[in-house]
């Protein structure tokens, strides 16, 4: 893991070297002041060397000016090194996430992934920048100040260093408490964010059900937890800083007393005594920095470990001999397919065998949870079958490259996902290289063009997060336009109209009819009126095909399909298509 971490420094090796040299110079300049102080008190002032007093005073001022420039360099470029490394890690992590199998996202919360990309990598970046500086420079400063103080008076120096373990113990103890308290505060902050996001996202439901009081109660509960966590955190922080400062003050008292006794006994002169007093902060500051480095190291290593944990998850892999589909017909076959999600539920699909010829429509019906959507996910190879085969144009989907397979499959789902951006950008997801003319043509086919042109910014209208500024029907039309632009040979309609009202469904039905023409189509539907004209209907129950045939054949058979159909359309209800409306498919 260390080797991989160090590899991220490679693009910045010269800048990092300059940053370390600048930090060393800053540390070295810090020791100059007590040295000059000693020379002033022991030599220049007693011997009335006016020129040297002025010269060394100006020299210290020049060095401080140089230190100011060096600090700017370290703060700016040092942090940019950390930022660059963080950006590269984030780029690598995001790219890897895009390659992970569909199953990974079934079991991993979005918030966890976002935390890895943001919070964890920020801790890593802080370690990347401050870690070497704090460890190397502070260590050298402590060693350098120790050597210098020993040249003045060894016994007094040893007395000071004997107090270091006390400072280390006290600081480590209270910093540990402070870290735990602030960790708890971060947890409560995340809970507030989650509650707020949930409430804002569901504000329409809140208002519809008069749930404002309930939402406020949930928010206030987490808000009070946050206040209590902050109380503990700031109490721990107050104890840490106040007691650490007290220990530092004790150092000064020890120097005053011990140095005074040494001065009284004639074992040290006044100039050396004053130098020790001046030097104590030069020595203590890097010690406290090293103590803080341990926590920074722990946070950074933990963050980097969580980062590499995701990178070690094997990406979605194609078979070694996978080849692209050259010419697409659109024949699909499920041959004795068995599949499960790897949990205690066992197989979701059990020995499924179906054939759909190019250009035909297959409808999948049955109760929810029967495995219809799962079956559709196997066609673009989003999941690999456990046993059996899924074939496209006679080739096993495992032997076809992901890109060539998925580029030829269009999916229109019930739960339409639109990205935060413009209408044009969302339609272009079907083919990012498409011209404006093709985008407009796709929108016209989806019956959304007139609506778009009625907006102030037309196709450049921002639709908001998940298309929040659009109605359900408008979002569905954009998803259909996206599919038109993709122009796939195979099409999956997964409950594409079930969430729409009757009027909107009638309008979108025409768009779907256009979209299905000339394409192999699989329709997942609960409304059986929408599948009457399918070339074949398969009834899926408990992961098995229990019936298949045309609408007429299944009705004559009088099995499960007929019962489902009769349940939906009792004698006192008329099917929708008899109301002067053409069937959806």
Image (spheres, helix red, strand yellow):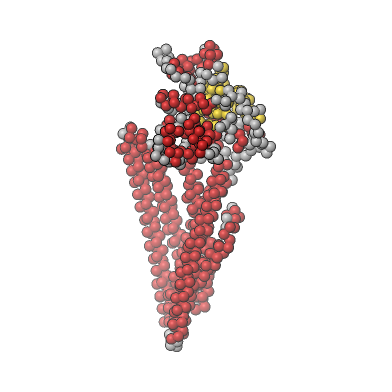
Front residue of this view, candidates 13 and 516: 516
Give the camera-side residue of 129 and 76.
76
Q: Residue at x 56, y 19 (%)?
A: 535
Place of residue 474 in the rendered image (x, y in percent of width and height, measured from the top left): 43, 32
Instruction: Determine the residue positioned at 51% across, 26% down.
Output: 514
Q: Depth check: 214 or 57 in front?
A: 57
Tally the numbered discs: 0
The percent coordinates of residue 238 (x first, y second) are 37, 59
Percent across and percent down for residue 135 are 52, 63
Q: Is residue 318 above or below residue 576?
A: below
Name the spot of residue 393 as percent of width and height, x first. 64, 28
Drawn side of residue 212 relative to residue 76, left or right = left
The residue depicted at 41 percent of the width and 24 percent of the height is 502
Q: Is residue 190 above or below residue 298?
A: above
Q: Is residue 166 visible?
A: no
Whether residue 59 is visible, yes or no, is yes
* Residue found at the far bottom of this picture: 47
User: Looking at the picture, does residue 316 appear above or below residue 565?
Assistant: below
Residue at the outermost right position: 321
Q: Nearer the viewer, residue 442 or 509?
A: 442
Residue at image location 33% in from the left, 32% down from the top: 209
Looking at the image, is 368 positioned above or below residue 281?
A: above
């Amino acid at each position: 893991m260390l080797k991989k971490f160090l590899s991220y420094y490679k693009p910045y090796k010269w800048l990092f070297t300059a940053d370390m040299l600048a930090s060393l110079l800053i540390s070295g300049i810090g020791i100059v002041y007590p040295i000059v102080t000693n020379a002033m008190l022991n030599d220049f002032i007693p011997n009335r060397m006016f020129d040297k007093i002025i010269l060394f005073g100006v020299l210290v001022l020049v060095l401080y000016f140089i230190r100011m420039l060096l600090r700017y360099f370290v703060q700016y470029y040092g942090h940019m090194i950390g930022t660059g490394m963080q950006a590269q890690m984030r780029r690598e992590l995001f790219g890897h996430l895009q390659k992970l199998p569909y199953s990974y996202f079934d079991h991993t919360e979005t918030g966890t992934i976002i935390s890895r990309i943001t919070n964890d990598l920020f801790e890593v970046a802080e370690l990347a920048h401050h870690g070497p500086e704090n460890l190397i420079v502070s260590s050298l400063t402590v060693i350098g100040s120790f050597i210098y103080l020993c040249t003045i008076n060894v016994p007094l120096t040893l007395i000071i260093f004997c107090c270091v373990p006390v400072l280390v113990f006290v600081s480590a103890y209270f910093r540990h408490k402070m870290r735990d308290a602030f960790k708890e505060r971060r947890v409560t902050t995340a809970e507030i964010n989650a509650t707020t996001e949930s409430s804002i996202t569901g504000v329409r439901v809140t208002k519809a059900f008069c749930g404002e009081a309930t939402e406020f109660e949930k928010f206030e509960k987490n808000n009070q937890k946050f206040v209590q966590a902050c109380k503990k955190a700031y109490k721990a922080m107050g104890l840490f800083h106040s007691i650490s400062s007290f220990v530092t003050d004790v150092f000064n008292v020890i120097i005053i007393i011990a140095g005074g006794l040494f001065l009284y006994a004639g074992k040290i002169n006044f100039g050396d005594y004053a130098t020790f007093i001046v030097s104590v902060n030069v020595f203590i500051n890097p010690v406290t920095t090293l103590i803080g480095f341990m926590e920074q190291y722990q946070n950074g290593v933990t963050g980097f470990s969580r980062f590499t944990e995701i990178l070690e998850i094997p990406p979605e892999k194609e078979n070694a001999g996978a080849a692209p589909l050259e010419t697409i017909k659109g024949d699909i076959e499920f041959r004795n397919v068995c599949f499960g999600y790897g949990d205690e539920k066992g197989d979701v699909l059990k020995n499924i065998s179906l054939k759909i010829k190019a250009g035909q429509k297959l409808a999948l019906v049955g109760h929810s949870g029967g495995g219809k959507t799962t079956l559709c996910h196997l066609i673009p190879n989003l999941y690999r079958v456990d046993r059996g085969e899924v074939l496209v144009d006679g080739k096993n989907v495992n032997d076809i490259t992901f890109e060539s397979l998925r580029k030829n499959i269009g999916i229109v789902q019930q739960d339409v996902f639109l990205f935060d951006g413009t209408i044009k950008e969302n339609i272009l997801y079907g083919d990012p290289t498409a011209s404006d003319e093709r985008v407009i043509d796709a929108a016209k086919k989806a019956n959304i063009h007139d609506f778009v042109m009625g907006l102030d910014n037309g196709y450049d209208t921002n639709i908001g997060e998940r298309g929040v500024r659009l109605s359900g029907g408008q979002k569905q039309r954009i998803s259909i336009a996206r599919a038109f632009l993709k122009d796939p040979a195979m099409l999956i309609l997964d409950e594409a109209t079930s969430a729409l009202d009757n009027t909107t469904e009638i309008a979108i039905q025409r768009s779907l009819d256009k979209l299905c023409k000339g394409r192999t189509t699989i329709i997942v539907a609960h409304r059986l009126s929408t599948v009457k004209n399918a070339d074949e209907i398969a009834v899926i129950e408990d992961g098995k095909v229990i019936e298949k045939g045309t609408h007429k054949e299944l009705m004559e058979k009088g099995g499960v399909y007929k019962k489902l159909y009769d349940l939906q359309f009792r004698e006192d209800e008329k099917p929708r298509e008899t109301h002067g409306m053409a069937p959806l498919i």
